[in-house]
Image (tube, rainbow, N blue to C red):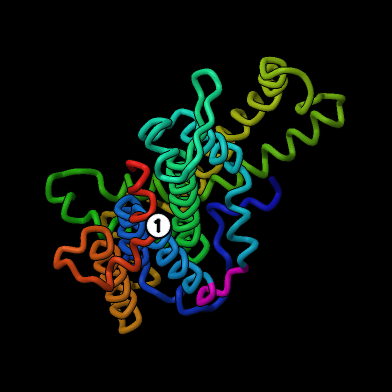
């Protein structure tokens, strides 16, 4: 847990780092929405290729980006396996008639269409995690707070606490790596005292985590108290009369990034729905056309 990927800024000077945080936040939201429209490996491949270009331009090492998956890889694989085992496709006859395979073991089945759906789900979840991670790698928590507050400013007309909400989100994001580091130190201290977190059944492992959770909660309250004192000593009183060191401006690279995202969004929707029936679009739906023979 020492090298926590999510929630940490990777401090380099790049085109992506210099983009307006409001643009990056909106592009990230559009990217996540786009992932739920994509329904084939080809469309996911186009999105993944675009994401690789962003990673290259951001100058963030690819291995560091992939490290954001290591804490949830078991959950991702478990979700995929459950999807595969509980999906019987169109039935044994349809699967075998289409040239696929169908294995049945009690209530579980493994078939061609189930593997296809499980693979799509795994790819979608991986891309969903990596996208927001890139946002935190290239944007400071303060910039994210300002961007979120700026985008939610119309809600302030309804007397909603926009600034307070944005500040809470930024503080929570900032504390993720801090709490993970605290957890690592506490677990190391417990192991030095003879505690074991890797042996026994799930109940014994959960019981072994109790000596970790209690000091972690105490440490969390202590951090919150110190943060409160620091904000009070700086006369923090909310958004009223507050000025900013860095004023956000929309520049040419921000417009270009927005247009590229709009073009990518339109392209994926065109491939998925093909409103005008263009034949060249069917090339990008090759795997979808193949799997449709299995009733998917």
Residue at x 40%, y 32% (from the top left corner): 93
Residue at the far front: name it. 97
Is residue 50 depicted above or below 182 in this figure?
below
Q: Which residues are magenta?
A: 56-61
Expressed as whole percent of the image width and height from the top left, the position of residue 47 reads 41, 64
- Quarter holding residue 281: bottom left
Q: Quadrant of the N terminus?
A: top right
Residue plotted at (48% across, 74% down): 53
Q: Residue 2's spot in the image, x, y percent?
A: 71, 49
Q: Is residue 232 visible?
A: no
Give x and y (percent) for residue 250: 29, 77
Residue 133: % across, % down: 50, 56
Front position in the image: 246 or 148: 148
Residue at numbered disc 1: 287
Q: Is residue 167 above or below residue 194?
A: below
**Label 1: few (<14), some or many (≥20) within 10 Å?**
some
**In the image, residue 145 lies in the stretch drawn in magenta:** no
**Which residue sits at x=32%, y=65%?**
22
Q: Which residue is pictured at 55% across the width and 42% down the height?
A: 226
How many numbered marks have been drawn onto this rendered protein structure?
1
Q: In the visual, does 28 lie left or right of 227?
A: left
Pick the residue in front: 143 or 84: 84
Image position of 44 with respect to 110: above or below: below
**Does dot 1 land on a helix, a strand or a loop?**
helix
Looking at the image, which residue sits at the far bottom? 252
The C terminus, quarter of image: top left
In this rendering, does residue 73 appear at all?
A: yes
């Amino acid at each position: 847990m020492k090298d926590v990927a999510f929630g940490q800024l990777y401090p380099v000077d790049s085109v992506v780092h210099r983009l307006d945080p409001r643009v990056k936040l909106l592009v990230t939201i559009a990217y996540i929405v786009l992932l739920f429209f994509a329904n084939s490996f080809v469309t996911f491949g186009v999105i993944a290729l675009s994401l690789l270009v962003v990673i290259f331009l951001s100058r963030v090492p690819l291995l560091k980006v992939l490290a954001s998956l290591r804490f949830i890889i078991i959950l991702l694989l478990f979700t995929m396996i459950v999807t595969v085992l509980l999906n019987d496709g169109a039935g044994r006859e349809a699967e075998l008639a289409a040239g696929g395979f169908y294995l049945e073991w009690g209530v579980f089945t493994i078939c061609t269409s189930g593997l296809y759906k499980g693979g799509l789900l795994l790819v979608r979840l991986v891309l969903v995690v990596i996208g927001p991670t890139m946002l935190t790698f290239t944007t400071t928590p303060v910039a994210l707070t300002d961007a979120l507050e700026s985008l939610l400013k119309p809600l302030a007309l309804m007397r909603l606490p926009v600034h307070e909400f944005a500040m809470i989100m930024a503080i929570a994001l900032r504390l993720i790596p801090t709490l993970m580091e605290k957890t690592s130190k506490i677990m190391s201290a417990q192991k030095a005292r003879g505690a074991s977190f890797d042996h026994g059944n799930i109940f014994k492992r959960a019981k072994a985590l109790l000596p970790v959770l209690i000091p972690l909660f105490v440490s969390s309250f202590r951090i919150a108290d110190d943060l409160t004192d620091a904000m009070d000593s700086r006369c923090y009183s909310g958004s009223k009369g507050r000025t900013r060191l860095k004023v956000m401006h929309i520049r040419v690279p921000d417009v270009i990034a927005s247009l590229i995202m709009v073009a990518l969004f339109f392209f994926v929707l065109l491939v998925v729905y093909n409103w005008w029936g263009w034949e060249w679009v069917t090339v990008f739906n090759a795997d979808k056309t193949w799997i449709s023979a299995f009733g998917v």
